[in-house]
Amino acid sequence: MIIYNVTVKIDWAIHDAWVSWMKNEHMPDVVATGCFSNSQLMRILDVDEKDGPTYAAQYFAVSKPDYNRYIKFHSIQMRQKSFDLWGEQFIAFRSLMQIVQ
């Protein structure tokens, strides 16, 4: 199992709308590409939230080729939707992990 993790720090100004969008639109759209079997959104604790909270969106793929298909055919459009809606009010970084146990 492969986990595509997107860690996002968001401005307080967009917090409620962003969380709703992630849960009800963006994450379901990513899973609907067929590249991932499911997803989960987690709030990261024990971080400085003065400028805004930090979340981890995780998408679960059965195999690396599934993840590669997402990156090749879907990721640019999905990222652009984020920028179109939220502009510079967030910062994100991505990591790819494999479940070992």
Image (cartoon, rainbow, N blue to C red):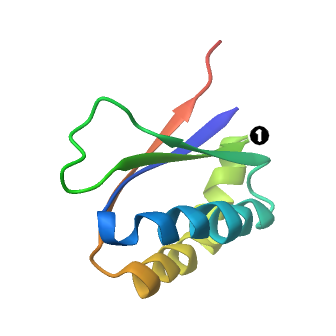
Q: From the viewer's perspective, is 91 left or right of 33?
A: left
Q: Which residue is mark 1?
A: 62
The residue at the point 43 percent across, 47 percent down is: 55
Residue 77 place in picture, x, y as percent:
56, 80
Camera-side residue of 86 and 75: 86
Residue 27: image quadrant is bottom right
The residue at the point 31 percent across, 63 percent down is: 12
| Residue 17 to residue 42: above or below | below
Residue 11 place in picture, x, y as percent:
29, 65
Image quadrant occupied by the C terminus: top right
Q: What SS does tag 1 mark?
A: loop
Camera-side residue of 19 and 5: 19
| Residue 13 to residue 93: above or below | below
Q: Which residue is outermost to the top?
A: 101
Numbered marks: total? 1
Give the amino acid at mark 1. Val
The residue at the point 18 percent across, 50 percent down is: 50
